[in-house]
Image (cartoon, helix red, strand yellow):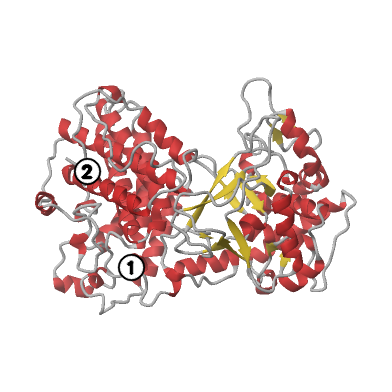
Amino acid sequence: MAMEMRARESVGMSEDLTRAIAPYATALHDAFLHSHCSSCFRKLPSQPPCAMSCMLCCSVQYCCSDCLSSDCEVHSSSGECCFFADHLKKASPSYVTEGTSDVRASLRLLYFLEMHGLVSSDSINRSSRIGGLSTIGIREVLEEGGEVAEMILKGSMLMSSARKMRTQTSVVFSNGLTVEIVALWAVMINSVEVQISDQWDLGIAVYGPSFSWFNHSCFPNASYRFVLAPSNEDYVSDKSEYRAVPASKGVAPDAWHAWQFEEGSTHALGKYGPRVVVRCIKPINKGDEVCITYIDLLQTREARHSDLWSKYKFICSCERCTASPESYVDFILNCDFRNLNSPENAFISLAIEDFDDILQQAISEYSLGDDPKACCAMIESLLSENLMGDLQQVELSQKRHILHPLHHICLRAYMTLASAYRFRALESSTDGFKGENSAVSFKMTKAAVAYSFLLAGATHHLFLSERSFMTPLAHFLLSAGRSMLDFVECVKGERRKNVSQAKFSFASCSASSGTRDSMQYHQFRSTCEEFGKHMLSLSLQCWSFLVQSSPCLEKIKNPIDFSWLGTAIFQSLHLSEVDSANLSCTDGLEIFTEEQKGCILSLAICCITFCKYLANLCYGPQHYLANHAKDLLEGIPKHTGEMCKHMND
């Protein structure tokens, strides 16, 4: 009885498929309860008028009287206020430290559904749904026991206790499940993390069928973004038509009732709270299913299935997961280096599990132990010993598994190393490269640039064969570009206005092309190819400098073109004779020259501009990622030195 969403009409890429959908329930994460508004999720004002709080529990804050008045009934009547005031203190310390947003969102969800007559015992017993939201898998979770089951039982007991304080009766269904257990599980598998900046997830939100019925795919054709509801009193509900509609067989009438309720009464869902908008990232034909992704796509099939089963209790059967032979990206993410030249003779090794354990231990050293130096040493030792290089055949045969730069272990390693080196650079110096730790700071910052660019380049390679990778690529491009800007700025010890640099204009990337409601797919491919060629050309001029004195990075001939790895590598960027010659030459200058500074700055601008282009397409021009890229680009003067030639020259 699974639901799905299908296109009402044929749509081109970069078009919104839904209006701004209001949530059923929301909850800030515990860490943001005293810094953000519990109603609209905006940051609390630091100047008068000051924030207001609930007078009874003092645990939730509001940015204005409108937010207070719109949320106070839900906060009080749902039992959330009692939860904070009386019952949270009785919970075990371990439960409290793990966060309470799931329980609080569940209290709010249950109150909302009960108030609108959307709780049906028949729907829960027969179709495993509450208010149209899936609750599939709850019986299996409780029967299996374990940590998740324990959390559900503890959380539901807290919910029941808080709700009884509001004179509400607890409902037990024929299968023995309580309404609190069902609601909490519905939140756990239907809620999404709300991210409205590039820093942290502020909290969670649960949306009705118009969003929750979008299924998962490992090759999605849509993405979603969050928008904050207007803060003015003249708010008008968005009544634009849905371009994706539900389709299913044998679903209980109550589920359809939930859809019809949401579609016909948007304003009743609340004036505030973060909205969600679904947007297509590929052309979609009329009647095709529209899918988003629930998980990180840069994982192997086994890891994705494990992730989906542990969180949502289903096994994915999308095009990518059922492909035979496996898709190119899954082959690349998991294969041994020796298979890149002979894919028909697959080399299988169990050593990858050992690599994954080492990597996870290093990440824990960094995130939990606050020891970035130990983290870098551990991961770079792993890469130095197991990443392919100039090994003799006898050495190749002795190794259990040989990594290559596009392997999923390496991608996770680059991500962690870029962050750890950035942190170490900030620790080592606060005055550019002029202080006593200038040499250390220079080395740390350069390594952060190299690893962040390598991560973006590897993801770009996967993107060339599967366009749904544009969403992680946009994020990694911004991170790489920002690291490069910081590096050039620190090298100069001055603001960027004195750096010799240039702006480019992209023939297929005019100011308007990324903001139109629809993009011609061939134009999109052409523009992405131009960006790729330009990043490749610039990387050939500065990569050898960035990787100097790093045994791991020196094994990487180029971070954009990976054709040197083997015959199995997908090739989309065709090198000129000059670029081919430069790629074969690995010797670089040891001195950081003015030309290299200009080249790295030009590369930074290219990465950020590419990020902005992709963010406009997959999220829309008002998304925080596009705005951040725009702010970075506007911080670089247009005419402060010699202009680079047009990329097509």
Would residue 91 be visible to someone looking at this image? no
In which quadrant of the rendered view does residue 339 lie?
bottom left
Q: Vertical placement of 478 versus 468: above or below? A: above
Instruction: Classify the position of the C terminus by image quarter.
Output: top left
Is 12 or 258 nearer to us in this picture?
12
- Residue on which disc 2 sits: 546
Tell which circle, 1 or 2, labels the residue nearer the N-terminal end.
1
Residue type, mark 1 in image: Tyr
Q: Residues within 10 Å of mark 2 (few under 14, many from 20)?
A: many
- Spatial CA span between label 1 and label 2: 29 Å
Report if the CB atoms under discs 1 and 2 are less than 8 Å apart. Answer: no
Residue type, mark 2 in image: Leu
In which quadrant of the rendered view does residue 597 lie?
top left
Q: Residue at x 38, y 47 (%)?
A: 476
Q: Residue 328 carries which label?
A: 1
Q: Vertical placement of 646 versus 321: above or below? A: above
Residue found farthest to the bottom? 345
Percent across and percent down for residue 29 are 63, 45
